[in-house]
Image: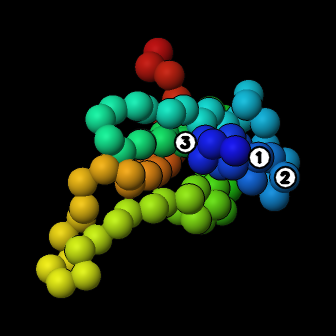
Amino acid sequence: MRVIQQVRQAIKSELGYNSRQVSVRDNPGGLSTSITVRLKKPGLDFDKIEAIAERHVKVDRCERSGEIMGGGNTYVFVERYRAPAA
């Protein structure tokens, strides 16, 4: 199962939020993967969603220098709800 599907499934099973409430998108680019989780409605539990999303972050680092290794990393970003501009 792809990471994006795992994030969606975890949010749905643990919090009961669906795609009308939370958007989970894959941002392909290069050798690493970036996932954006966006809250679409006010009043959703940002902290719990962020905790679920952070479980899926995978960043490989050099054992000696601690630098992030190129390729194969998964970054997850969570965006709070923003009311549409009037």
Q: Do the CB atoms of the residues marked 3 and 2 lie less than 8 Å apart?
A: no
Task: List the residue tagged with mark 1.
Answer: 9
Percent across and percent down for residue 54 are 53, 62
Amino acid on which disc 2 is placed: Ser
Percent across and percent down for residue 63 are 25, 82
Q: Residue furthest bottom?
A: 64
Real-space Cα separation, disc 1 to disc 2, in angstroms: 6 Å
Which of pointers 3 and 2 lies earlier in the amino acid sequence? 2
* Vertical comparison of 81 with 76: above or below: above
Real-space Cα separation, disc 3 to disc 1, in angstroms: 13 Å
Total of numbered circles in the picture? 3
State whether residue 50 appears in this view.
no
Amino acid on which disc 3 is placed: Val
Percent across and percent down for residue 68 are 24, 64
Residue 61 vs residue 9: left or right?
Answer: left
Residue drawn 54% across the image and 32% down it = 25
Q: Do the CB atoms of the residues marked 1 and 2 lie less than 8 Å apart?
A: yes
Q: Do the CB atoms of the residues marked 3 and 1 lie less than 8 Å apart?
A: no
The picture quadrant where one finds residue 67 is bottom left
State the mark number for residue 13. Answer: 2
Which of pointers 3 and 1 lies earlier in the amino acid sequence? 1
Mark 2: secondary structure:
helix
Residue 26 vs residue 13: left or right?
Answer: left
* Vertical comparison of 69 with 34: above or below: below
Amino acid on which disc 1 is placed: Gln
Task: List the residue tagged with mark 3.
Answer: 37
Residue drawn 25% across the image and 61% down it = 69
In-front residue for pair 12/26: 26
